[in-house]
Image: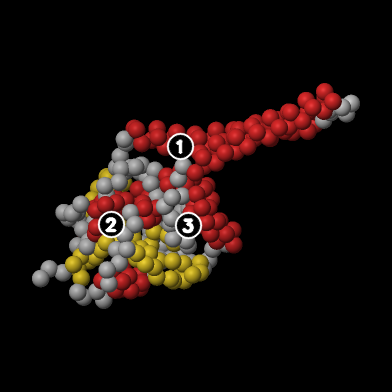
């Protein structure tokens, strides 16, 4: 009887200081999974350091390791997607290369998968080595996203999770270019549960997500899974129009029936500047949706593969 296959997918971008440690930790865990076969898929997202060279060395000595490298940096979501596109596993674990997510949770995830759960996501109880601002903005993101979006993402989670082959196959049919992997996985529904853990600080190196990238991720997430901002714009526009009509009517009544002078050039200028700035902001929100439409209709590929090592994909 053939053993089931477990795929471990890890996006990599400038992680030369972490790759060998990551490999050692994954092999240590994989060797405990005696009733499964396994493969480790490392996806190099156009790294500028020695990450792909290390991946080549790992592939040459271990045929269970597969490496994919892009022609350039296409982003974390694209590299995660590539790993899911090329994996063969009956169950797939997504884990970052910085060792903040503990590989020792994988056996526990597999036990829950064996019980019938199709998604087992890891929820952070604590986050070592991160600033108060990073923790606060992260919590704020999930609460704002879930307040706007039709699809809810479990709070305080990342991409670290196990997903069933059925989930992977459905995910691989998604065509959109501006994608949030954890959002698309949640969108499908499926039977899911969580494991709580304490997230460690990075093993080495620096995070690749600065606040600009996090802001872009937040905008992509909300605009990909909700049209609520557009509805909110319409409501705000109607409110401002109604308020302006009412205020104008009051001024007209004051002019016709009282001797009270209507002054206030300063307040008028401030109001005009405020409304103009607010209009530009609202146009920017609409522009985000239009930009995404433009990106989708071009139908460019999500990523371009430069080289694949130990390739043996035979499943969709």
The reply to whether the C-beta atoms of the residues labelled 3 and 2 are less than 8 Å apart is no
In the displayed structure, would residue 279 be above or below residue 208?
Answer: above
- For the question of whether residue 124 can be seen, the reply is yes
Real-space Cα separation, disc 3 to disc 2, in angstroms: 29 Å
Q: Determine which of the numbered discs, if any, sits on residue 167 in the image.
A: 2
Give the mark nearest the N terminus, 2 or 1: 2
Q: Please, which residue is most extreme toward the left here?
A: 1
Percent coordinates x, y for residue 283 in the rendering = 55, 33
Of residue 169 and residue 249, the one placed in the foreground of this image is 249
Q: Determine which of the numbered discs, if any, sits on residue 207 in the image.
A: 3
Q: Please, which residue is most extreme toward the front here?
A: 257
Percent coordinates x, y for residue 198 in the rendering = 46, 71
In terms of secondary structure, where does tag 1 sit? helix
Give the side of residue 37 with respect to residue 128, left or right.
Answer: left
**Quadrant of res 104:** bottom left
Q: Determine which of the numbered discs, if any, sits on residue 289 in the image.
A: 1
In terms of secondary structure, where does tag 2 sit? helix
> Which of the two marks, 3 or 1, is nearer to us in this view?
1
> Which of the two marks, 3 or 2, is nearer to us in this view?
2
Give the mark nearest the N terminus, 3 or 1: 3
Give the side of residue 35 with respect to residue 217, left or right.
Answer: left
**Quadrant of res 88:** bottom left
Q: What residue is at 71 percent from the left and 32 percent from the top?
A: 246
Percent coordinates x, y for residue 138 in the rendering = 52, 57
């Amino acid at each position: 009887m053939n053993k089931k296959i477990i795929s471990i997918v890890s996006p990599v971008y400038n992680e030369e200081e972490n790759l060998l440690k990551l490999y050692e930790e994954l092999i240590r865990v994989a060797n405990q999974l005696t009733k499964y076969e396994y493969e480790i898929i490392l996806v190099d997202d156009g790294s500028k350091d020695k990450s792909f060279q290390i991946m080549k060395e790992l592939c040459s000595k271990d045929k269970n390791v597969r490496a994919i490298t892009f022609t350039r940096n296409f982003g974390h979501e694209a590299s995660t997607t590539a790993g899911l596109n090329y994996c063969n596993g009956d169950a797939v674990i997504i884990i970052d290369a910085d060792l903040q997510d503990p590989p020792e949770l994988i056996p526990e995830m597999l036990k829950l998968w064996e019980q019938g759960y199709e998604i087992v996501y890891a929820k952070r109880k604590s986050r070592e080595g991160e600033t108060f601002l990073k923790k606060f903005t992260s919590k704020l993101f999930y609460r704002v996203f879930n307040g706007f979006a039709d699809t809810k993402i479990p709070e305080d989670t990342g991409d670290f999770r196990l997903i069933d082959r059925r989930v992977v196959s459905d995910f691989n049919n998604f065509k959109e270019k501006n994608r949030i992997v954890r959002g698309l996985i949640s969108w499908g529904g499926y039977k899911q549960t969580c494991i709580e853990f304490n997230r460690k600080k990075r093993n080495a190196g620096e995070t690749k997500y600065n606040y600009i990238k996090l802001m872009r991720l937040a905008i992509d997430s909300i605009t990909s899974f909700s049209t609520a901002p557009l509805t909110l714009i319409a409501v705000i526009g109607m409110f401002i129009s109604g308020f302006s009509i009412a205020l104008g009517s009051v001024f007209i009544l004051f002019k016709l029936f009282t001797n009270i002078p209507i002054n206030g050039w300063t307040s008028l200028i401030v109001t005009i500047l405020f409304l103009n700035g607010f209009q530009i902001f609202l146009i920017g929100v609409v522009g985000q949706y239009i930009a995404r439409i433009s990106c989708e209709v071009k139908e460019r590929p999500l990523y371009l593969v430069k080289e694949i090592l130990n390739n043996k994909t035979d499943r969709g």
